[in-house]
């Protein structure tokens, strides 16, 4: 069975740093794009970042560019999110998400497996 | 960034009803749109990709349509387990963007 297990969430002060990890199992990690999606308490979903299968391509939402870094270790089947200069508005549940990109007439994304989520709280 | 405007933001309905949720994109996104269901305290679940392709295992009462800027998720006969929040997601261009969500409540 596909499993995505996040860890590393914590209470951190504004301006602080944190690393989220996601351990993947039950599928061939090296053949999937991976994403981080977050959800502030009681709010909607926000896509944060993604990374190509081999780590050669990364994309970020503007609000985290220059502060967050997505990375992966394919030998360890793991996805990471290094979060720096944290702000109160980064408080959210962070989900690790697999993207089953497929092609028919175009390339399409399918966020088909999600982790259980990990809470990051930024507060003094 | 492409803005996804989802409506309504909340909806009251009863078991057996037909329910329609819409998403409007701020620009043409072809059919690069997915629909997700989120139950309270749970991670979202993929229902539909490419605007109308039903994910394996998702009941056939769910359907999606649309292309360009206007998209629709329809639930043909609402079941008790369908009371949840629904989100659309455009994957046409970065940054990927979600609609604001539609909370479907039991009338």
Image (cartoon, rainbow, N blue to C red):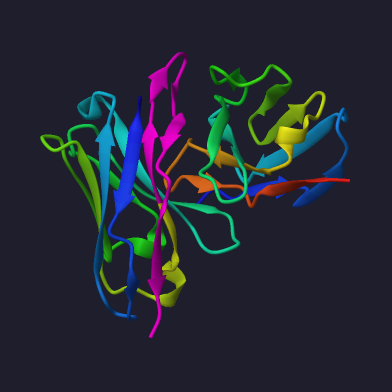
Can residue B30 be seen at all in this image of the molecule? no
Q: Relative to B100, does residue A42 appear above or below in the rendering?
A: below
The residue lying toward the viewer, choosing from A27 and B6, is A27
Q: Relative to B62, does residue A6 appear above or below in the rendering?
A: below
**B14 relative position to A42: left or right:** right
Q: Relative to A120, does residue B44 appear above or below in the rendering?
A: above
What residue lies at 63% left-to-right and 31% top-to-bottom? B68
Point out the residue furthest to the bottom here: A124
Count up the numbered dots. 0
**A101 relative position to A16: left or right:** right
Can residue B35 be seen at all in this image of the molecule? yes
**Horizontal and vertical percent for residue A79?**
24, 44
State which region is magenta: A95-124
Q: Main secondary structure of the magenta part?
A: strand
The residue lying toward the viewer, choosing from A29 and A117, is A117
**Horizontal and vertical percent for residue B54?**
59, 19
Point out the residue furthest to the left here: A75
What residue lies at 76% left-to-right and 28% top-to-bottom? B75
Q: Is residue A101 magenta?
A: yes
Choose top left, top right, bottom left or bottom right for residue A54: top left
What residue lies at 53% left-to-right and 17% top-to-bottom? B56
The residue lying toward the viewer, choosing from A115 and B102, is A115
**A123 relative position to B17: left or right:** left
**Horizontal and vertical percent for residue B93?**
45, 40
């Amino acid at each position: 069975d596909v499993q995505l297990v996040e860890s590393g969430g914590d209470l951190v002060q504004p301006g602080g740093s944190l690393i989220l990890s996601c351990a993947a199992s039950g599928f061939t990690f090296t053949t999937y794009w991976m994403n981080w999606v977050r959800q502030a308490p009681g709010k909607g979903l926000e896509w944060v970042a993604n990374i190509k299968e081999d780590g050669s391509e990364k994309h970020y939402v503007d609000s985290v560019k220059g502060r967050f870094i997505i990375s992966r270790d394919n030998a360890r089947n793991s996805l990471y999110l290094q979060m720096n200069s944290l702000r109160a508005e980064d408080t959210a549940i962070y989900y690790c998400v697999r993207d089953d990109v497929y092609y028919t007439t175009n390339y399409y994304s399918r966020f088909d497996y999600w982790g259980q989520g990990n809470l990051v709280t930024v507060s003094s | 960034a492409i803005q996804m405007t989802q409506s309504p933001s909340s909806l009251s309905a009863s078991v057996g009803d037909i329910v329609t949720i819409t998403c409007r994109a701020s620009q043409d996104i072809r059919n690069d749109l997915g629909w997700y269901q989120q139950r309270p305290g749970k991670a979202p679940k993929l229902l539909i990709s490419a605007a109308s392709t039903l994910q394996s295992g998702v009941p056939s009462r769910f359907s999606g349509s649309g292309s360009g800027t206007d998209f629709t998720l329809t639930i043909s006969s609402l079941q008790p387990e369908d009371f949840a929040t629904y989100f659309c997601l455009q994957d046409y261009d970065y940054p990927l963007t979600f609609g604001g969500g539609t909370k479907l409540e039991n009338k």
